[in-house]
Image (tube, helix red, strand yellow):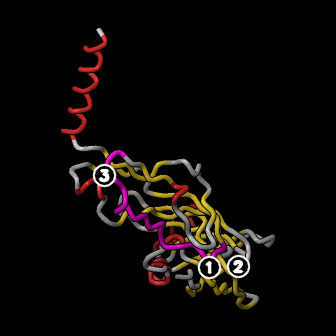
């Protein structure tokens, strides 16, 4: 499913510094910045409640925005993504957000979560599934950023590893070593003990 743009209105602000930022938060807004695209940096204010509602519920911070930027000279429209943000460690609330202007036809670099689905054949045989990556780094145009990398582990037998090179997502480039392991099925313990005993027997036979 395409990463459809979500609309959000932000306002240009003139003040900066800790004092004005604190007063802005007390009024229910948070400070932010809009930059990139060969244009000037703009200091903006955002309503965090409106921002949360505007976010794609699945993509969250990977939401592709159509920003309506309101200022003294009128309003302008910008294609943007969230480049950075700050969370209050005590209240777990958003306290600052940076937006990056983007070109719909130019790739951006971001991370997407890895979602493991299915039950591995090796697990059904008594093995244990081990997963190694929660996120992978990708490059894609803003409208093509997927919700997640869906990994089906069903075909994995005991002692088999699933690597990134076996996965693909349309219009997405992985920016990771293709040999990186995503999942592995550890063999049943009984099988491990048997293999260990076999090795001992072979060593004894050689003596």
Determine whether label 1 and label 2 are within 8 Å by CB.
yes
Could you say where residue 18 lies in the image, as x and y percent from the top left?
57, 61
The image shows residue 155, relative to residue 29, as above or below, that is above
Residue 84 quadrant: bottom right
Residue numbers of the magenta segment: 141-159
Q: Earlier in the sequence, mark 1 or mark 2?
A: 2
Mark 1 lies on residue? 143
User: Which residue is under mark 2?
Assistant: 104
> Residue 10 falls in which quadrant of the image?
bottom right
Closer to us: 64 or 179 = 179
Binning the other alpha carbons within 10 Å of mark 1 as few (below 14), some (14 to 19) or many (20 upward) gives many
Q: Residue at x 60, y 81 (%)?
A: 65
How many angstroms separate mark 3 from mark 2 (CA)?
Answer: 39 Å
Which mark identifies residue 129? 3
How busy is the neighbourhood of tag 2: few (under 14 within 10 Å), some, or many (20 plus)? Answer: some
Q: Secondary structure at mark 3?
A: strand
Q: Please name whichever residue, 27 or 151, is drawn nearer the observer in this view of the structure.
A: 151
**Residue in the picture at 59% in, 85% down:** 5
Left or right placement of residue 196 versus residue 164 in this view:
left
């Amino acid at each position: 499913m395409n990463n459809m743009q979500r609309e959000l209105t932000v306002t240009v602000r003139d003040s900066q510094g800790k004092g004005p930022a604190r007063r802005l938060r007390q009024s229910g807004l948070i400070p932010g910045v809009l930059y990139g695209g060969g244009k000037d940096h703009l200091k903006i204010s955002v309503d965090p409640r409106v921002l949360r509602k505007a976010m794609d519920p699945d993509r969250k911070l990977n939401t592709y925005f159509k920003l309506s930027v309101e200022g003294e000279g009128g309003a302008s429209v910008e294609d943007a993504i969230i480049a950075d943000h700050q969370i209050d460690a005590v209240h777990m609330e958003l306290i600052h957000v940076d937006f990056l202007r983007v070109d719909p036809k130019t790739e951006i670099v971001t991370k997407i979560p890895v979602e493991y689905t299915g039950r591995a054949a090796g697990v059904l045989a008594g093995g244990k599934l081990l997963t190694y990556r929660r996120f992978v780094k990708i490059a894609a145009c803003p409208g093509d950023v997927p919700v997640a990398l869906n990994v089906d582990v069903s075909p994995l037998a005991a002692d088999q590893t699933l690597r990134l090179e076996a996965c693909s997502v349309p219009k997405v480039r992985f920016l990771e070593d293709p040999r990186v392991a995503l999942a592995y099925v550890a063999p049943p313990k009984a099988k491990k003990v048997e293999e260990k005993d076999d090795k001992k027997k072979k060593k004894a036979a050689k003596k």
